Image (spheres, rainbow, N blue to C red):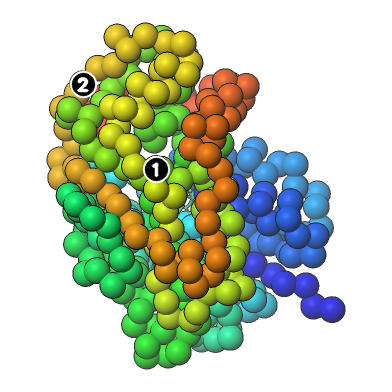
């Protein structure tokens, strides 16, 4: 029997790593090719334990390179595109690479599928940030896109290309828009690992503005399960919001982490707000829940505790990252 083959892009990053591990832990017969350019957020150690597993192959390459993408697309049954530049602060300092990787990179994948493997299913991993912020209520999938940052603009442009390639060429594409993820293997420039690591070192924990920005947090393995279910059950051409309903102001989240770590709130330092900072994200995820039967499994508090424990017991993983710019409280002002 032919075993399913998934081409994962960006599989050495945070969600991609968790997704590949999820697939191997839950299926014995799926093969994964992981295409990643090993940019700053990638860590080859994340999947080292699968290096000699016949189901897994790593290819160092770049989705900005059309020829490289074409070479790998041929025999993939499914392409899951995680590869992206993902940090809003860096997109403010240096937008171009976001357009190149997040929009043109995705375009290369769609075009390679159209030319060489039009039967493949493409799952494009987008974000809640494409809708912009919402002060009350929640976005459904049919809301117009109103991105606020160069990062979310590059992701929104990619979503629109997905829509056009489905409509014009009938390519089987599903777009997922998920809220903020947390869990193991997340690069320490992001809020939750940054808070845990800095608190552990008794360093100040910076919070942008007044800390009232609201994010809806989802444990990364709940996100991975949603993607997995969409591979089998998603309808071509559809967009699916993914959220857990754990909305929290940043200040409350940071206080919760400090309290769980037995650290004092005096570590908190309010710093200048990020330009264009979205106040609140909120998604209505009833479509994936009702149509696909997905729902989150992890309790927020327990998953936060497990995440703290993971970072505390995997010091070697983050101690290798020595970029001093990560200590800067207003990173969007730096040259990256
Ligand atoms: N982290 C979140 O909270 C979140 C929420 C919703 C959606 N997303 C989306 O999920 C995807 C993965 O996010 P993440 O948090 O794992 O990001 P990440 O930054 O941890 O990982 C991104 C990976 O993509 C790779 N990459 C970047 N540019 C590439 C290129 N041009 N060619 C090949 N590989 C490239 C990097 O090396 C890295 O391994 C992104 O598309 C992001 O927009 C993330």
Query: How dense is the environment of label 1, judged by Cα within 10 Å: few (below 14), some, or many (20 and up)?
Result: some
**335, above or below 102, in the image:** above
Q: Is mark 1 within 8 Å of ligand 1?
A: no
Image coordinates for residue 55, horizontal then vertical, percent = 77, 59
> x, y percentage for residue 261?
48, 16
Q: Is residue 154 left or right of residue 13?
A: left
Secondary structure beneath dot 2 equals strand
Q: Report the residue at 23% width, 29% height from top.
A: 211
Q: Is residue 316 visible?
A: no
Q: Position of residue 316 (x, y in %)?
A: 61, 23
Mark 1 — residue?
Answer: 246
Task: Kindly identify which residue carries mark 2.
Answer: 270
User: Which of the two residues, 169 or 64, is positioned nearer the viewer here?
Assistant: 169
Q: CA distance from mark 2 to mark 1?
A: 23 Å
Q: Is there any visible trace of residue 235 in the rendered image?
A: yes
Closer-to-camera residue (80/286): 286
**Image depth: mark 2 or mark 1 in front:** 1
| Residue at 53% across, 39% down | 299
Rendered position, 81 above or below 167:
above
Q: Residue furthest front?
A: 290
Residue lying at 59% horizontally and 56% vertically, measured from the top left: 225
Q: Earlier in the sequence, mark 2 or mark 1?
A: 1
In the displayed structure image, the side of residue 320 where residue 252 appears, left or right: left
Q: Quadrant of the C terminus?
A: top left
Say which quarter of the image contains residue 323: top left
């Amino acid at each position: 029997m032919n075993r399913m083959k998934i081409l994962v892009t960006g599989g050495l990053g945070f969600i991609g790593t968790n997704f590949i591990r999820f697939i191997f832990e839950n299926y014995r017969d799926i093969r994964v090719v992981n295409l990643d350019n090993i940019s700053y957020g990638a860590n080859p150690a994340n999947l080292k334990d699968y290096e000699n597993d016949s189901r897994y192959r790593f290819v160092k390459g770049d989705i900005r390179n059309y020829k490289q993408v074409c070479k790998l697309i041929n025999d993939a049954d499914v392409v899951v595109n995680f590869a992206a530049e993902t940090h809003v602060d860096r997109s403010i300092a240096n937008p171009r690479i976001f357009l190149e990787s997040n929009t043109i990179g995705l375009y290369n994948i769609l075009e390679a599928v159209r030319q060489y493997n039009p039967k493949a299913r493409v799952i494009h991993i987008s974000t809640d940030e494409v809708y912009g912020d919402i002060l009350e209520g929640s976005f459904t999938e049919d809301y117009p896109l109103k991105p606020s940052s160069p990062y979310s603009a590059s992701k929104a442009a990619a979503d629109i290309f997905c829509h056009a390639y489905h409509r014009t060429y009938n390519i089987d594409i599903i777009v997922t828009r998920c809220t903020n993820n947390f869990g193991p293997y997340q690069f320490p420039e992001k809020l939750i690992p940054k808070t845990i690591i800095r608190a552990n070192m008794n360093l100040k924990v910076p919070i942008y503005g007044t800390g009232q920005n609201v994010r809806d947090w989802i444990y990364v393995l709940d996100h991975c399960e949603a993607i997995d279910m969409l591979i089998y059950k998603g309808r071509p051409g559809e967009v699916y919001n993914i959220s857990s309903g754990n909305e929290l102001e940043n200040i409350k989240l940071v206080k919760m982490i400090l309290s769980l770590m037995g650290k004092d709130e005096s570590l908190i330092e309010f710093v200048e707000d990020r330009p264009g900072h979205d106040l609140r994200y909120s998604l209505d995820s009833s479509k994936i829940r009702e149509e696909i039967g997905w729902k989150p499994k992890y309790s927020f508090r327990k998953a936060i505790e497990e995440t703290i424990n993971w970072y505390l017991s995997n010091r070697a993983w983050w101690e290798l990252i020595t970029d001093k710019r990560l200590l800067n409280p207003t990173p969007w002002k730096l040259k990256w």
